[in-house]
Image (spheres, rainbow, N blue to C red):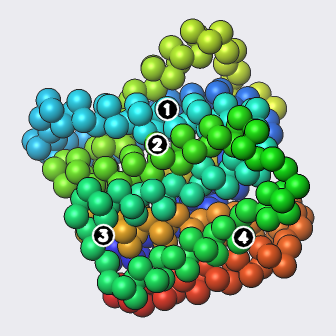
Amino acid sequence: MPIVFAFISFFGWGIGSFAETVVARRLQPYSFALWGFILSSLALSFYAPFVIKNLNGLTFDLLIFIAITGILGLFLGTIVFYEALRIGNRALVGTIAQSFPAVTVLVSTLFLGERVSVQQAIAIVVIFTGLMLSSLSLRAIRTKNIFSDKGVLLAFVPMICWGVWFALLKIPIGRIGWFWPNYLTLLLFPLLFLYTKIRKIPIQKPTINRAFIPLIAFIVFIRIAELSYNFAISKGLVTIVAPIAGANPILFIILAFIFFKDKITKQQIAGIIVTLFGIVLLSLLST
């Protein structure tokens, strides 16, 4: 069962990232983030009454824990990610930030006491190796002094923030279920609005440049992916679910090739094959 929902997250995040690219071309980053959080909160509010009984396990300490991890994980990670994209090499920034599942696995192993077999560990390494091959341009690394690029350095912040957040979600999920941790975190969107006001960042309407429909598609697929991930780790190990769900960049590459006509290099093809092999191997070893 956890593997099935890990794959739902894989497809949700992959398709959602594709829709994100469409929206990013039509809506400024901070407007995109803010409307994404607001509309997600409104949509999930319709389901909240059906799981209200799960809040019996919510304590003040747990609420503070969710708020702190949400602010430092999801919100800070998102803000710094967009800032890194603004000033840095987008390809390298995206690759580094999307490597957060590696941090998730590490945190889950070191602090949540999760353990995997040697064979599963090898499969996880294979997945991450494939992701690096498919997403990271070795030529760009050789020809650019990446450590002089402030955006690239900033990209390590969302990688760590998101990685830790997706690992620590296991704690509140164990007490109040798979729905509430994400929903309560999204309700913190006024903080992002306040940040844009302090920085005097203008907020565009979500309907500008025909951004609304792809924005809705992004919200639907990303939120389904997140909630499926939450349900998966409520039933299984984060160290197994995160690598499978986090391998979604290869799906984005394939969709970009089909719809955007982006070229796929031999290195990317090799990376996709290696990643898929690792996913299948990990799935077989975890059933």
Which quadrant does the N terminus fall into?
Answer: bottom left
Give the amino acid at mark 3. Leu
Name the residue at 85% across, 63% down. Answer: 139
What residue did someone put label 1 on? 76
Q: Which image quadrant is residue 158 in? A: top right
Name the residue at 45% across, 20% down. Answer: 191
The residue nearer to you, when weighing 83 against 244, is 83
Q: Mark 2 and mark 4: span between their CA atoms?
A: 23 Å
Residue 87: percent from the left, percent from the top? 76, 32
Going from N to C along the chain, the mark reached first, 3 or 2, is 2
Q: Mark 1 and mark 3: span between their CA atoms?
A: 26 Å
Q: Mark 3 and mark 2: span between their CA atoms?
A: 20 Å
Going from N to C along the chain, the mark reached first, 1 or 4, is 1
Mark 2 lies on a secondary structure that is helix
Mark 1 lies on a secondary structure that is helix
The crowding category of the residue bearing disc 4, from other C-alpha atoms within 10 Å (few below 14, some 14 to 19, many at least 20), is many
Q: Mark 3 and mark 4: span between their CA atoms?
A: 26 Å
Q: Mark 1 and mark 4: span between their CA atoms?
A: 27 Å
Point out which mark residue 237 bears. 3
Going from N to C along the chain, the mark reached first, 2 or 4, is 4
Residue 98: percent from the left, percent from the top? 59, 54
Name the residue at 43% across, 39% down. Answer: 73
What residue did someone put label 2 on? 161
Going from N to C along the chain, the mark reached first, 2 or 1, is 1
